[in-house]
Amino acid sequence: MTHKPAERAIVAAHQKLSESLPFADASDNEDSARGFIAALSPAVVDAADGRVVWDNDKYSFLSGAAPATVNPSLWRQSGLVAKQGLFEVVAGIYQVRGLDLSNITFVEGDTGVIVIDPLISTETAAAALKLYRSNRGERAVVAVIYSHSHVDHFGGFFGVATQEDADAGRIAVIAPEGFVEHAVSENVYAGPAMGRRAGYM
């Protein structure tokens, strides 16, 4: 392949970087696969109207070596975070990864399951809960915890719980102090800028 002068400089820089990093060390791949139970296949989540909400299969191009014009370290990292499915973190704690911008965690207890950070949308959270239940059983959701106010950590609440259950106290909803104020200030005021940044990412 023939590259323009600017591209040749990038290719040379990436080649130099590739030679300086321990790409033969595959422990990151082993670590990211540890505890794997099952994947969503196909890894596509649709809305009720047929819209595609999330398509992790679009990242399948990340297999193999990085193209010469792509930073090899970023390519490797992208491949690691594109792995999706249900994983056992430790006994009683499970995560579904790769169905959204963030990960959803399920903590099994005596009376049900606690959901931590229910993703960005109802559809992806519901798909994650379905994948969890299909492998771990029909445990009731008894609590939802928001670790912080970024929308990808609370936007999928209605995929794992209902307003009626929350209002009736059947599901505890736990969030940091000032959560609503921070959620509004970050996602409403700064939402357009964050959306543009996400588009570039």
Image (cartoon, rainbow, N blue to C red):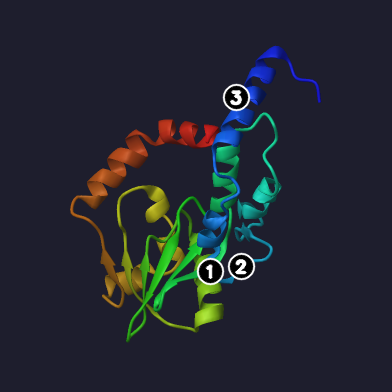
- Image-quadrant location for residue 14: top right
Sequence-earlier tag: 1 or 2: 2
Q: Which mark is residue 86?
A: 1
Element at label 3: helix
Q: Nearer the viewer, residue 165 or 127?
A: 127
Sequence-earlier tag: 2 or 3: 3
Return the residue at label 2.
Answer: 39
Tell me if residue 123 can be seen: no
How crowded is the residue under tag 3: few (<14 C-alpha within 10 Å), some, or many (20+)?
A: some
Residue drawn at 51 percent across, 54 percent down: 100
Quick one: which residue is furthest to the top in this view? 5
Tell me if residue 20 can be seen: yes
Callout 3 amino acid: Ala
Q: Are marks 1 and 2 in contact (CB under 8 Å)?
A: yes
Return the residue at label 3.
Answer: 13
Residue drawn at 55 percent across, 44 percent down: 22
Sequence-earlier tag: 1 or 3: 3
Q: Nearer the viewer, residue 29 or 42?
A: 29
